[in-house]
Amino acid sequence: MVSAEKRGAEIRQFILEHVEEHPVDIVTLTMENFGISRQGVHRHIQTLRKQKALAIRGTTRKRRYTLRPLVKFLESYSLKTTLEEDVLWRRDIRPVLGDLPDNVLTIWQHGFTEIMNNAIEHSMGHSVLVSVDKTAIATRMMIMDDGLGIFQKIQRELGLHDEHHAVLELAKGKLTTDPAHHSGEGIFFTSRMFDSFTILSGKVSFRHTYGELEDWIFDDQDHRKGTAVFLDLINRVSRTTQEVFDRFTDEYKFTKTTIPVELAKYGEEQLISRSQAKRLLARIDQFKVVFLDFRKVGMIGQAFADEVFRVFANAHPDMELCAGGVNTTVEHMIRHVAGDRADAILGY
C-alpha cells in the first residue's frame, strides 16, 4: 500500500510536471490520472499555492494554472570592465540557483561560464544581461550581449558565405575563430547538456533539444543585435557532464560528431551540387566518426552524393562515415555512388 503522504506527493508532482502543457484542464487531467475527485485535486492545488509553487489566474470559468517562479534574477554587467566568469558564477549565479543536485549544478556551472566567457572575450559588446527564472520543475537562464553577433562574427572571420553557413559550422563542433586560446568545443558540448539550448543572433536562430540528433535553424525577418543564449534544464535530471562528454569522445579526445545535413540547405533548395557537399564536409576531417543525419532531407543529387560518399570517403579511408535517417530516395543515391561500402555507411 502506498502511504497517503507519498500518494499526495506524487499527485502534486504530477500537477507541477503537466501544468505548463495543460494550464486550463490540469484539474481534469489529474482527476483522470489518479481517479480522485475534483475537490481532492483542488486540495493539492491549494497546497502548491501555499508553497508558492503554483499560481492561479482568472475566474472560475477562465481559470488558468501556471508554475510560479521561485527565483527571478536579472543583472546587467559592463563588458568594458574586468569580468571573470568564475567569479560571477560563485558570487551571483550559484546562490540564486539554490538547492539543486550536484550533477545539475555542474551542468549549470559549465553552461554559464562557457557562454559568459564567449560574451566577455568575443562579443565586442558594451554590456551583457543575465536572467535566471527558476520554478519548482525547471530553470531557464538567458545570457544576452549587445555585441557583433556570434553568427556574423563567425561568418566574417572565417570568410563564410552567410550566417546560415556559420550555424552549420557551429553545429559540427571544434569551431573557433581564436585557435590559440580556444578549442572550439565549448558551445558544442554545452548545447548537448541542456534540455533546450537556443542561440538568437542576427536573422538566424539555432536550437538543440536534448536527446534529438538534429539541430534546428530558423529565419527571422527582424535583425537582432548581439547574441542571446537561452539555457533550459529540468531541476532533477540524472545525466552528468561526463556522460555528455563520453558520447562524443574517444580516449579523452573529441572525435565524434553528428551533423544535421539539412543545415547545409538554403531555403527550399535541394542538395544537388558538389559545392554544397564541400560546404557540408568542411573541417569534418578533424573527427574519426561522423554521423550524417539525413532526416528532413527528401533527396540528394548524384554530384552531392558522389562528393560525400565516394570522393571524400576515398580520400579519408580511416574515417568512419555513417548516414542515418535516410528515406528510400536518399538511400538509393548513396548506394549508387558508394557501391560495396554502402552497407557499412548505412549501418546494415
Image (cartoon, rainbow, N blue to C red):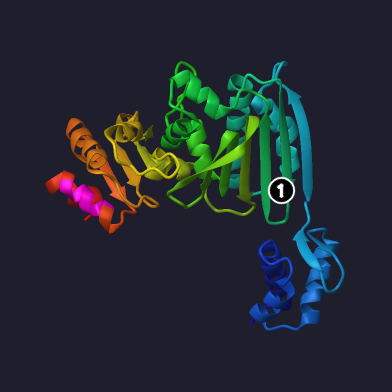
Side (left or right) of 343 relative to 237: left
Quarter location, residue 108:
top right
Side (left or right) of 93 relative to 160: right
Quarter location, residue 112:
top right
Question: Is residue 296 or residue 64 the one in the foreground?
Answer: 296
Secondary structure, mark 1, is: loop
Q: Is residue 206 above or below residue 275?
A: below
User: Residue 77 in the image: x percent, y percent?
Assistant: 74, 25
Which quadrant would the N terminus be assigned to in this image? bottom right
From the image, tell me which residue sits under label 1. 99
Question: Is residue 147 or residue 246 the one in the foreground?
Answer: 147
Quarter location, residue 144:
top right
Which quadrant would the C terminus be assigned to in this image? bottom left
Does the magenta-highlighted stretch encompass residue 266? Answer: no
Q: Is residue 68 above or below residue 25?
A: above
- For the image, the number of numbered tags is 1
Does the magenta-highlighted stretch encompass residue 333? Answer: yes
Q: Which residues are magenta?
A: 330-336
User: Residue 146 in the image: x percent, y percent?
Assistant: 68, 26
Q: Please identify the dominant SS of the magenta region.
A: helix
Residue located 34% across and 28% down the image: 283
Side (left or right) of 294 relative to 184: left
Q: Is residue 114 above or below residue 331?
A: above
User: Residue 325 in the image: x percent, y percent?
Assistant: 34, 54
User: Residue 93 in the image: x percent, y percent?
Assistant: 71, 36
Disc 1 residue type?
Asp
Residue located 18% across and 38% down the image: 310
